[in-house]
Image: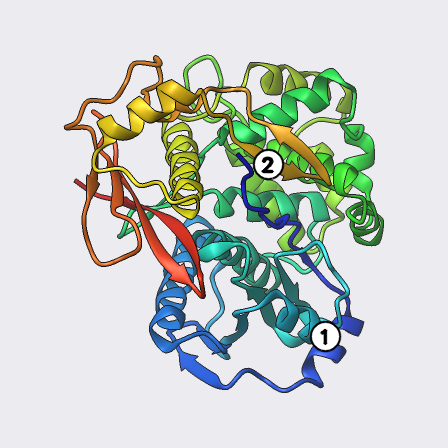
Amino acid sequence: MEKKRIPSRFAVSVAACVAAAASARAAPPLEIQSRHYRVLTDLDEATARDYARRLDAMYDEYARRLSDFGAKKGKKFDVYLFRKRSSYAIFTNNRLPNSAGIFIPGQRALAAYEEGQGRGGLRQTLQHEAFHQFAWETISPNLPIWLDEGLAQVFEEGVWAGESFILGQVPPRRIEDLQSDLRQNRFTPLTDMLSMPRQAYQARMRDAKTGRAQYNQAWAMTQFLIFAEDETGKPRYRERLLAWLADMHAGRDATAAFESNFSGNIAGFETRFKEWVAALKPTPMAVYADRLTKLAELLRLFRRDGLSFESIDDLRDHLARGRFHLTEQRDGETVMHDENALLYLCDLNSVGWTDKQIRFERRRGPLPDIVLSPPNGLTLRIRFHKVGKEIDHELSFEMR
């Protein structure tokens, strides 16, 4: 079965030429004021207010996690949200055709669109892009681009649990790509990543495969600095990362400050990083989210073909008879997911969830919600909604 195309989240800050182009175009018709943002959009008001609330929550998370830098109070950031990708392309003069969102430093603004990403995808894009805004003013406008992008991705992967964000998630897709890149020697040497100018980094993003590898490496390097543990289970490098950020905030050269806070032995540091990547495992919540999202995609495609199911057991029986696999368009190529779709109804040990752990819940909508309640952690819920004539879905996490 074919999976809908998900646009690449190659989200980068852009040059003044794009800012100038954007500022010359008419703003979307609806304006919403939140605590930290001015949202200008052509989306409906209820949807736009939901995005605005999430943006405020994410800003508070940035400020809490990076409290040493003191978030500035003053003029709100501008956020341009578009329903269609074509409107976003016009607004940005189509300077970044592979992007799902951008931060425009000269305008203190970000822009993104919903079409193709869905609501869940756009929320992740906003979590990413809003960090660029925050870091630009609060930490430094001169962060190394790999670190700027890496930190933004760490926040992008954060799970919103209704009251706070849970960071540190490691999705299976990242592991697959990273460990494949490691085996095939596609990692950019650490010395090059540490010193790569912003313009050169962005130029490499124009090639889909190179861009994906570079993007994932930036995430992995940052995840390593924040979450890699020492022998006692405590973060090994986190305090040094904060000290490095403080040095850059004070205006010190990024490369010199890196060596003083971490190591001048870059080759040795790179070896430890690659060992960490080789042993990295996906986090349980990220696995559950991945499987439930794929299950939702199957149900969407089945519904398009005229099939629906009264219960999870009915769905399980159908999957067992057909041995379905999802395919996905990635970097212009069709990739088949190896796992049998029955796995999407299983726990981490490949044991099927019981009817008390996974179920359908009826509500107003084109398909019933899928609700998963693992023995430990948050409850995961997939909601379906109509977008024009199509059905889309979004994942949320709920406290129990």
Q: Mark 1 or mark 2, which is nearer to you?
A: 2
Q: Position of residue 173 (x, y in %)?
A: 55, 30
Q: Position of residue 193 (x, y in %)?
A: 77, 37
Q: Name the quadrant of the C terminus.
A: top left
Dot 2, how many residues are within 10 Å of its Cα: few (below 14), some (14-19), or many (20+)?
A: some
Position of 62 relative to 356 (above/below) = below
Q: Position of residue 121 (x, y in %)?
A: 49, 52
Residue 126 disc label: none
Dot 1 lies on which element? helix
Q: Sequence-wise, which precedes: disc 1 or disc 2?
A: 1
62, 114: nearer the viewer: 114
- Amino acid beneath label 1: Ala
Dot 1, how many residues are within 10 Å of its Cα: few (below 14), some (14-19), or many (20+)?
A: many
Q: Residue at x 44, y 34 (%)?
A: 169
Q: Residue at x 52, y 31 (%)?
A: 326
272, 124: nearer the viewer: 124
Residue 328 disc label: 2
- Amino acid beneath label 2: Glu
Q: Quickly name the residue at label 1.
A: 19
Q: Residue at x 61, y 65 (%)?
A: 85
Measured in 3D between alpha carbons, the distance from the residue under mark 1 to the one under mark 2, in whole angstroms, is 33 Å
Q: Position of residue 319 (x, y in %)?
A: 37, 24
Q: Seen in the image, is 398 located left or right of residue 251?
A: left
Q: Residue at x 34, y 12 (%)?
A: 349
Tell me if residue 113 can be seen: yes
Q: Seen in the image, is 267 located left or right of residue 121?
A: right
